[in-house]
Amino acid sequence: MDTFSTSSGQPDPDTGDDRFASARPVDPTIKGFTPWQLSVSAIAVVVLAVALWAILATLGAPVIGVLFLLPTLACAGALYAVSMRRRLRLGVIADLAGALARHLGVPDAAYLDIDARQWQGGWVGVPHVLNIQYPTQVDDSAPDWAAGVAEVVHAELEQQYTVGRHNIRGHRLTLRDPTRTAGSLTPEPAARAERAAVRRSLPDTIARPVPTQADLSSWLIPLGVDASGTRVGWNLAAPQGHLLVLGRSGAGKRVLLTGIVVEAAARGWPVWIIDHRRVDLLGVRDWPNVQIVASTLDDQIVVLNQAWREMEGRVALIESGSSRNDLEPLVVVVHHFREFATAVADAANRAGQGAAAASLAHDRVTDLLRHGRQVNVYVVLSVQRADDQLLREENRDDVGAVVALGRLDSGVATALWGGDRPSEPAEPVPGRAVVQTGDGKPVLIQCYWTPDPREARRVKDEQDLYLLDALRPSLVTHPVLHVQRSRVMTESPEAAWRVNLNADLAEGYGASTSGLADWSRARGSGGSPAPAVTQVETTGWSEMVMVSQLQAGSLARLDDETGWVIIEQVEAVPNDGTKLLIHWRGNDGAGSQVVSRTRAVRIRHLNDGIY
Ligand SMILES: Nc1ncnc2c1ncn2[C@@H]1O[C@H](COP(=O)(O)OP(=O)(O)OP(=O)(O)O)[C@@H](O)[C@H]1O
């Protein structure tokens, strides 16, 4: 127990407050030794020890002298350390007394006697019990007087207190650590109160705003808003373009991924999804430009493999002289990556494959993270654990943005954000997250709420349906894909594994996806739906180009009605520079139609041997 009096001093003659004219500085409460006495004791012990050693050395026993000297010097050091700590604590209390004297209108800190006890927390620490004796002249009649004093102490020592006892007759106030005494806590000082207000000002739900034309031409996908209401987004054009979403069950991963998918689709980009939980992202399966949502493990392996091949194909294109700007972004979402990678490893083991096959998912994703961005293939990964090994490895540097939903353990947060670790952890509100983009400072945001299209349709939620209608792309630029296997996989796990590795993605719905209506894939579509199955006999690779880039001889898919056709001639339309007249020939005959120059169409290259 340490007890201190405030520093001595005389009343300030200039205060002009004659209430205290008759008051005297209080006698300090002194219990135990003062720092000065402790320091003198330490020096005395040293002198004594050295003297004894000298005597023993003179008597011819210097070794015994040293044995005596060492512990005595250690005692002296400990005494000195205690005296230093007492001095520092005195300084803390002197500062507190000064602040209280100003608050109470007392001429000088010497008019207060502060008895500070039970210091805890660190080398100097803070007292957990304070007895404050103040002059009788202080007006303490206001009902909130004691709470006001506690607030000043809180601000000064950065420790909350409750009023333990206010002895009005004895002019003595006792403040205590709130963990020991019930009572109303002192409110946070202004700065902390402001931070708390900022935290409170983050909304619990905020609907994804309808993108403007400017938004749709940008590569920034909005994720949510920070406390100041500023939009925070994932920038695909950033030096490391990929996105990692972390969060325990129920933290809001599915809602966020749904938002990212609809935003990417609205920009006309193709989206491929590996939904390891099978049903989480089912709601966007028939969303325009979402080409495939792979829900079985076999299909998921094929989609990941194809994404990797697409990347390799694009790399080959760049090597042969194409510009990266000609390649539209492909967004590949892997939901619950860790579970998926484990399931792939299990399947590889069952099929008697080696270690290379077991790490297929991990290796493919690592490759996509490392090289995908150079060819505009972007990966969105979700994992449940913030200490996933994916983050510990070198590919942490390949991830441009990290969204950590929900609370993180402090150790994990420090590992993740380093010295920039946000001061306030995310609240337990679904969609509340800490986001770091690039090397920027992590910020707390509320992720936008994006409805699940399937669920909104089922419950007929008008507001959600309205929002989804506004988000739905008006033009389907990327046809739906299905997994095309060379033969059925009934022979053995090993054959199934090989079939998966050789399988392809083909346009249209496959037989196994029957029951999925291609309902109004495009916004406001009153026209005919896409055919249920598109037969694609050809091999090769396809890409999206603008109608103005079509040439005679191109194999193109102008729209769902014409299917694949050979372009015979491209003509300008008189008096309308925005359109072109296309003459084409297909399996079922020939035709011509006027099409906007800027419309995106898919063309297929047959013999380039990219795959
Ligand atoms: N941004 C958000 N705004 C408002 N509510 C949200 C938001 N995100 C999630 N929620 C709420 O939390 C619930 C759980 O979210 P979600 O399904 O996205 O969690 P999850 O992390 O994908 O869980 P799991 O890992 O189990 O699939 C949602 O049904 C929704 O009610």
Image (cartoon, grey):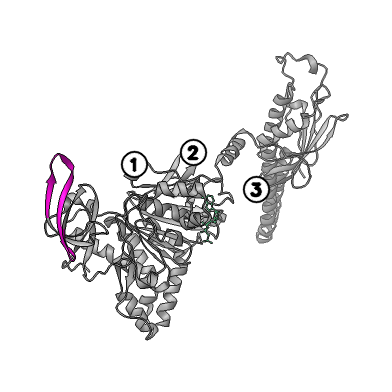
Residue occupying the point 42% across, 43% down:
210
| Residue placed furthest toward the right | 169
Q: Are marks 2 and 3 in contact (CB under 8 Å)?
A: no
Dot 1 falls on a residue whose secondary structure is helix
Residue 387: image location, x then y, percent: 50, 61
Mark 1 vs ligand 1: CB under 8 Å? no
Question: Can you say whether 492 is above or below 513 in the image?
Answer: below
Q: Earlier in the sequence, mark 2 or mark 3?
A: 3
Marker disc for residue 229: 2
Disc 2 residue crowd, few under 14, some 14–19, many 20+, Cα 10 Å: few
Residue occupying the point 69% across, 39% down:
89
Residue occupying the point 31% across, 74% down:
503
Mark 3 vs ligand 1: CB under 8 Å? no
Marker disc for residue 213: 1
Q: Is residue 415 visible?
A: no
Question: Can you say whether 178 is above or below 64 in the image?
Answer: above
Q: Nearer the viewer, residue 520 or 192?
A: 520
Where residue 519 sits, quadrant-wise, is: bottom left
Q: Nearer the viewer, residue 12 or 230?
A: 230
Q: Provide the residue designation for mark 3.
A: 122
Three-letter residue code for mark 2: Gly
Q: CA distance from mark 3 to mark 1?
A: 57 Å
Numbered range of the magenta stretch: 569-590
Dot 3 falls on a residue whose secondary structure is loop
Q: Nearer the viewer, residue 414 or 562?
A: 562
Three-letter residue code for mark 3: Gly
